[in-house]
Image (tube, rainbow, N blue to C red):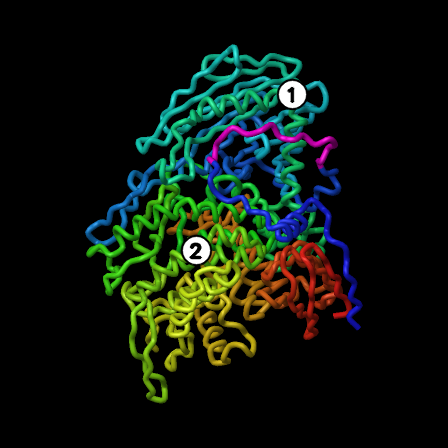
Amino acid sequence: MDNRNTDSPDLRPSRRGFLAMAAASGAVTALGGLPAFSASAAPRRPAESPVLADHDATRNQLWWQAPGSANSMIEQGLPVGNGRLGALVSNDPASELLMITDATLWTGGLNDNLQSDGQFPYGRDDFGSLTLLATLTVDIPDHDLGSVDNYRRTLDLAQGLVTTAYDVSGVTYQRQIFASHPDDVIVAYFSQQGRGTYTGTISLAGTHGESTTANSAGRYATFGAAFANGLRYGAAVTAYGSGGKVVVDGTSITFTGCRDLTVVVTGGTNYTPDAATRFRDPSVDPERLARSKVLTAARESARDLLHTHVADFRRAFEQLDVNLGTSSAAQRELDTWERVQARHRDNVPDPELEAAYLQFGRYLMISGSRGSLPIGLQGPWLDGNDPDWMADYHTDINIQMNYWLADRAGLGDYFDAFADYCLAQLSSWTDVTRRLFNSPTNRYRNSSGRIAGWTVAISTNPYGGGGWWWHPAGNAWLCQNLFEHYEYTQDRAYLQKVYPLIKGAVEFWEARLISTTVTDASGASREVLVADSDWSPEHGPLDALGITYVQELVWNLFENYRTATEVLGRDTRYARTIDGLRKRLYLPGVSPSTGWLEEWMSPDNLGETTHRHLSPLIGLFPGDRIRPDDSTPQDIVAGTKALLTARGMNSFGWANAWRSLCWARLKDAEKAYQLVVNNLRPSTGGGNGTAMNLFDIYETGPGRGIFQIDANLGTPAAIIEMLVYSRPGRVELLPALPAAWAASGSVSGVGVRGGFVVDLGWKNGKVTQARLTSVGGRSTTVVAGGTTRPVHLKPGESVTLRSF
């Protein structure tokens, strides 16, 4: 028996309720147009404390028994962020260090010229790089680490809060650091329990040779400057306390005998997402704006600043909850870094740690993707001005992987930064494509000589510029992410916004495809459409026709375009033309020599068997044309498994995350889980794995590793994909549940394609109950344990399914 009950609409102030109301009323999704650093209205202060009690907060806390080293901040500093500003904090009792980044502080520019080899220049001056904004140091000489007892620092994922506590001479001191989105500042609040006081110095320093000035009357310090590209930037800090003195002394702020101390810092640039103004707003004075923001925030108590921030942060974090099982008492006694090491050393599942790793990824998304540029290779967390690959936006996996998590994990609103970026860049991408793509120096130019629409380079920057090689299929992959967001939300207004991006990419491919003849195993010939000369990122020959990667992406682009035109009721004649092209596209077969799905239009393996990229498997994930069911020929499924097996189980973090997602799609729970575990292995000596602060480390050479955020976001997406698979019209529960999590567990708030959110619980590997809520969807089929349940709902309604 179904035991089906229809529940009332979810009225909590959450994404579910918001999207349901938006879908029902046709509300327009707010995308694009707003400057990243701008004046804002006074935030609404919560009437009651939203701070969680200690026993409620513990389950979403990570903790360490030692501070981070100033010489190893990227591996030991703890991240805070408000979507635009990010900071790594050291939590050193005697010298608190914050390394502060603004997501828009980029050198470089449009970079609209090709070199003789057909590549865009790719350096810090021409293409440009994300750089640090400032460092903030709070020196407290009397709190030398050697005189400290009972040290503990905590990262509270649910409240967006870094807390440090320690004892000095019998007095317990505490500091709380957070990056507030409502107040657009970073706050460090120093307090104590007893008769202790704080004495020391606050120093704000730029990282590009700027001079900091101070105003004794206003009790603040600031700096401002401009890059050679015309981008203006600035930062400011102020402080206030009780029971002592806080004064400006030269270019720094000193505090003496304070029972508590509040430090407020912010900064930004005059970047604006408008190509018509060259992405600068000349009316914005960043130094003056930073000063205004810190002084405005300083009128509030530290308590009110904290409560406003926590209320805001919790609204996002609490959209998803996950329980993968119970860890042992011995595991719980270990600090986070000890648990990571023990998980690897003992090879014993630690389900609470694994759930926390998922939530850490969500924490980074909330902290790094809001009201500004999207998350690039490192998000807004740097430890210097020379990040590898400029911390840019790679379009051949990395920026796309960064956003696979958002809709799945109850953070659909945080996808807006990705969509905003693409919308803001479209005019530049279109202009550069039409001027330069068919240049004689571009090895990937269209052999027909035709050009239309837009595409991108492998690397992109916030000024419309490209770096490295052209990446013709990058437009289709970006549009895959953009359209999939619509599948989750069913937000027609959003689809209308991004439609020009999708249509422009379609126009590019209509002009680029060429006709060729293929012969099948029986000797029969047929004419097909294939992509012009291209590269299977970043692998194999540089020039090949009809590579699987592109064929799958273009097939997906054309299919999504057809759906978009049907939903919006526009361009129906052109849509029929494009659908005719889609039906003529060559699609890969299985190599008779390797047994693998072909990566090139060749039975031979033309590259490295264990290559990091899974480019030929893009039709399995993130695409969905290849499915391990009756809708896909079994020889294709077998060839897909064979190729994925050949690629191996041990690669870079982002590559392991992609592998895990693919194995989850193939419903191989243990392989998908093992790849999650592989990413949790501790990084030592710069090797691939997880750093002390849980950042993923990418090994770039012997003894050298860098932080690259995509694995921190892609691996949690894989965990969710193991628990819930979806496509419009179908939701599968526990498709790849590993033995480590099978005893009992639950997850709530998972977004599913088709416009629903699902909550479910399980025991002994079987679903015990599932609740489906519509956020715009009306019909789907829920599958669990071989049982199928059709569901029909109105937006805002819910249904609970039992007896699977």
Q: Is residue 181 visible?
A: yes
Q: Which residue is mark 1?
A: 260
Residue drawn 36% across the image and 50% down it: 459
Q: Quadrant of the C terminus?
A: bottom right
Q: Is residue 48 magenta?
A: yes
Q: Nearer the viewer, residue 485 or 123?
A: 485
Quarter of the rendering containing residue 546: bottom left
Q: Write the start and end of the magenta stretch as one range.
A: 35-51
Q: Which residue is mark 2?
A: 478
Q: Which residue type does callout 1 highlight?
A: Asp
Local crowd size for mark 1, using a 10 Å CA cut-off: few (<14), some (14–19), many (≥20): many
Q: Quadrant of the N terminus?
A: bottom right
Expressed as whole percent of the image width and height from the top left, the position of residue 708 reads: 46, 48
Front: mark 1 or 2: 2
Q: Nearer the viewer, residue 713 or 669?
A: 713
Expressed as whole percent of the image width and height from the top left, the position of residue 195 reads: 71, 18
Q: Nearer the viewer, residue 407 or 20?
A: 20
For label 1, the SS is strand
Magenta span dominant secondary structure: loop
Q: Is residue 771 magenta?
A: no
Lower sequence index among marks 1 and 2: 1
Residue drawn 63% across the image and 33% down it: 164
Expressed as whole percent of the image width and height from the top left, the position of residue 748 reads: 68, 55
Residue drawn 59% across the image and 17% down it: 199
Local crowd size for mark 2, using a 10 Å CA cut-off: few (<14), some (14–19), many (≥20): many
